[in-house]
Amino acid sequence: MSEFLFVVVPYVCLTTFVVGHLWRYRYDKFGWTTRSSQLYENRLLRIGSPLFHFGMLGVVGGHIIGLLVPESWTNAVGISERTYHVVAVVGGLISGVMTVVGMAILIYRRRTTGPVFSATTVMDKVMYAFLAAAITLGMWNTIAGSILTIGGEYNYRQGVSVWFRSFLAFQPNADLMANAPLGFQLHALVAFGLFAIWPFTRLVHVFSAPVGYVTRPYIVYRSRDDTRLGSHRPRRGWDRVG
């Protein structure tokens, strides 16, 4: 079962992630958008969106460092495990709280603002469910495993991180995840599920960059003041010619 859950399922999800984006870009370029609802409601969006997005930047950055940087590398540059642990927990909690609060505001806004709720698709709801589950499990792992040490303190850098790097190297060691606490296992599976549905949601906008805005020409507006159009009064459509 561990081979299926932590080898087959992740590779299927990763394949869906890559192929799905290629398909979406090829056949749904006009749908490659955030489907912004800013025109419908702006007050809550101005609060929730920055909290969520900046929080997610911290969450993603923490995962990249925690999963891809081996423990031996940080030890080699003089960062003790204790120091790394404190920085990771504090940074993770701050980023996690920002993300949770921001997402709660955005979900509340989407549910209580009529036009925004009407524009919400089924995939939007599925996406929010996976996001909420992944973030909640991640926060629980941080609090229960690193602060409360429920079930004993677990060093994910010697288990989950090694498994993830072996997965990327196409030499997955499922036993490392099989021996991890249940919270880490669920977090990994939900995260890969999110990657699987990613190409079919508004999350595709993560891979878009407004590069064209740098070279886009200015938009010139002409004044409606008739006195600037010349010395002659403009002719109306019903005026007789000549």
Image (cartoon, rainbow, N blue to C red):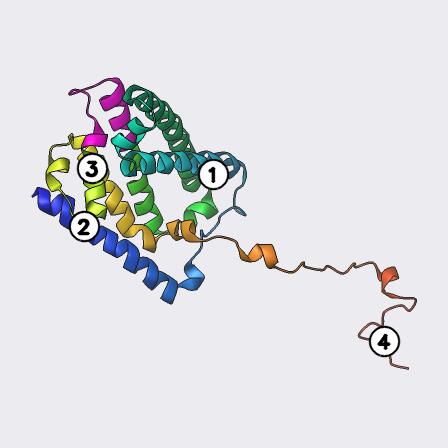
Mark 1 vs 3, N-terminal side = 1
Q: Amino acid at mark 1?
A: Ser
- Residue 239 is marked as 4
List x then y, in percent, for residue 153.
Answer: 19, 21
Residue name at image x 18 percent, y 50 percent: 170
- Relative to 52, 226 lies left or right: right
- Residue 170 is marked as 2
Q: Amino acid at mark 2?
A: Phe
Task: Judge depth for marks 1 and 4 and give the one in front.
Answer: 1
Disc 2 crowd rating (10 Å Cα; few below 14, some 14-19, many 20+) is few
Residue name at image x 26 percent, y 42 percent: 191
- Residue 162 is marked as 3
Q: Amino acid at mark 4?
A: Asp
**Which range is magenta?**
137-158
Instruction: Please determine whether, in this image, residue 5 is positioned above or below residue 70.
Output: below
- Per the image, the residue denoted by label 1 is 49
Q: CA distance from mark 1 to mark 2?
A: 36 Å
Residue name at image x 89 percent, y 66 percent: 230
